[in-house]
Image (cartoon, rainbow, N blue to C red):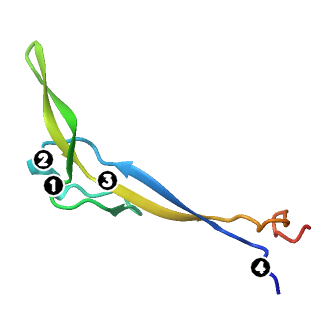
Amino acid sequence: QMKKQCDQKLLIRMKTECVPCSLNLQTQCPAGYTKITNGTGIPDCRYYLEIKTHTLSFLGCRHHCVKEFEQPECCQGHWGPDCMGK
C-alpha cells in the first residue's frame, strides 16, 4: 500500500506584544502556541508611553511563540480530495 497522503508540517511563528521587560515574565503565548523564549523574553522592541504632550519610547521585551500544524497534502503524482487520483 503506497502512501498517498504526504502532510506538510508548517511552523507558524509570532511575537507577543511589546511590554516593559519586568512585566513580560507573566506574558503567555496565545492558545495553541508554545513559548520558545524564557524569562523576560527578548529585548528587541519598543513600547510607547504618552505623557501629556509627549510620547516617550522605551526598550521593551516580548516573547517568541511557535505553533506547529500539519497541512494535508497529496504525495507527488497523486491528486484529489482523497489523493486517489493519479
Mark 2 and mark 4: Cα distance apart in space: 49 Å
* Residue that mark 3 sits on: 64
Q: Residue at x 12, y 32 (%)?
A: 58
In the visual, does 25 lie left or right of 75?
left
Q: Is residue 31 shown left or right of residue 55? A: right
Q: CA distance from mark 3 to mark 2?
A: 14 Å
Q: Is 20 on the left or on the right of 76, as rendered?
A: left
Label 4 to label 1, Cα distance in Å? 45 Å
Query: At x 90% / y 67%, what residue is drawn?
Result: 85
Say whether marks 1 and 2 touch (CB < 8 Å).
Answer: yes
The tag earlier along the polypeptide, 3 or 1, is 1
Identify the residue under disc 4. 3
Who comes first in sequence, dot 4 or dot 1? 4
**Circle 2 residue:** 21
Q: Nearer the viewer, residue 86 or 71?
A: 86
- Marks 2/4 in contact by CB < 8 Å: the verdict is no
User: Which of disc 2 and disc 3 is earlier in sequence?
Assistant: 2
